[in-house]
Structures are given as C-alpha cells and as structure tokens.
Amino acid sequence: MGDKSLTLEDKKRYHARVRRSNFRASLRLEGFQVSDSESVKPLPSRQAVIEKYRTKVKI
C-alpha cells in the first residue's frame, strides 16, 4: 500500500469534480447541448441563487 493519505481538501475537490461531471451528463441525457467549458465554470453559491429568485419574485 502507498503512504499517501487523502486530505479533506483533496476529497472536496474530487467530489466537486464528480458532481459537475454528473450534472453535465444529466443535462446531456435531457437533450441539452453542453460544452466542455461549462464544466470548469464555478457553480453559484446557494445564497446567490436564493437572492436571484427573491429579487425576481418579490413577496
């Protein structure tokens, strides 16, 4: 076995990469055109998405 142990940051980067890859694959399956450049774009934060829709809907 190797002496290398994964750090928490390594695990976070891996899961972020897999999540983006899975999201792209699901879009492709739904028929959307997805380019490779979209996989490197950072996803918006949850708070940014909430604020966007709050200003759109204004309750």
Image (tube, rainbow, N blue to C red):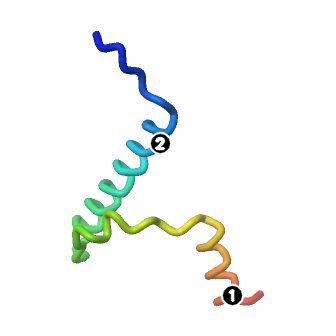
Q: Determine which residue is flagged by label 2.
A: 12
Q: Quadrant of the C terminus?
A: bottom right
Q: Residue at x 27, y 70 (%)?
A: 37
Vertical placement of residue 20 versus 28, above or below:
above
Residue 24 appears in which quarter of the rendering?
bottom left
Farthest-out residue, top: 1
Q: Is residue 33 left or right of residue 45?
A: left
Helix, strand or loop at mark 2 = helix
Looking at the image, which is closer to me, 36 or 30?
36
Vertical placement of residue 55 versus 42, above or below:
below
Q: Position of residue 1 (x, y in %)?
A: 28, 10
Amino acid on which disc 1 is placed: Thr
Q: Determine which residue is flagged by label 1.
A: 55
Q: Position of residue 49 (x, y in %)?
A: 59, 73
Q: Position of residue 2 (x, y in %)?
A: 30, 14
Nearer the camera: disc 1 or disc 2: 2
Farthest-out residue, front: 3
